[in-house]
Image (tube, helix red, strand yellow):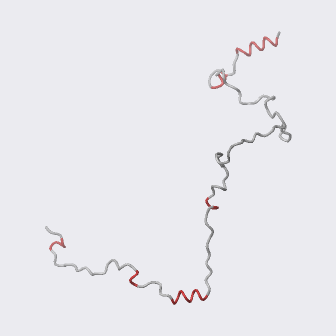
């Protein structure tokens, strides 16, 4: 009798944070799991469940592996040229370019200034 009376009183008397706010909503679910919901099985001995492996075409499955998108691995190999003494002597003797191969100098004429211009060159 006392137990049922206590339950009826608990139903009408609410805690202060249950009167307003998100806890007052009738669909509110407490975030703390019950004892029966917490750790249903021991992590060392999970239940024997057969894994579900998706069967699909490999071309249509998105590849999430990192190394296939790693641009550092996609670089071409580094080319190294080993020069012998004969190659160096030959390149010194060969004349591979002349002065006419270079573009002409930008400023190749001198500018004469008229120092007697009226108003320093500006017209009035």
The image position of residue 4, as x and y in percent, is 80, 12
Query: Along the line of sight, which residue is nearer the eye, 42 or 93?
Result: 93
Above-or-below relation of 2 to 64 = above
Farthest residue toward the top?
1
Residue at image position (38%, 83%) is 100
The image position of residue 118, as x and y in percent, is 14, 73
Query: Along the line of sight, which residue is nearer the eye, 43 or 122?
Result: 43
Farthest residue toward the left?
124
Q: Report the side of 112 relative to 56 (left or right).
A: left
Above-or-below relation of 80 to 4 = below
Q: Quadrant of residue 89?
A: bottom right
Query: Along the line of sight, which residue is nearer the eye, 122 or 8?
Result: 122
Residue at image position (64%, 22%) is 25
The image position of residue 15, as x and y in percent, is 69, 21
**Quarter of the image with the C terminus in it:** bottom left
Above-or-below relation of 70 to 94 = above
**Quarter of the image with the N terminus in it:** top right
Residue at image position (40%, 84%) is 99
Q: Report the side of 94 relative to 43 (left or right).
A: left
Q: Quadrant of residue 84?
A: bottom right
């Amino acid at each position: 009798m006392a137990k049922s009376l206590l339950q009826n009183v608990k139903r009408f008397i609410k805690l202060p944070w249950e009167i307003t706010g998100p806890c007052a909503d009738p669909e509110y679910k407490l975030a703390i799991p019950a004892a029966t919901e917490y750790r249903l099985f021991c992590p060392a001995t999970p239940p024997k469940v057969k894994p579900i492996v998706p069967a699909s075409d490999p071309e249509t499955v998105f590849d999430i592996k990192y190394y296939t998108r790693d641009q550092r691995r996609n670089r071409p190999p580094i080319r190294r040229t080993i020069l012998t003494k004969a190659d160096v002597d030959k390149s010194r003797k060969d004349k591979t370019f002349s002065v006419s191969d270079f573009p002409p100098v930008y400023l190749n004429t001198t500018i004469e200034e008229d120092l007697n211009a009226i108003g320093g060159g500006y017209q009035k």
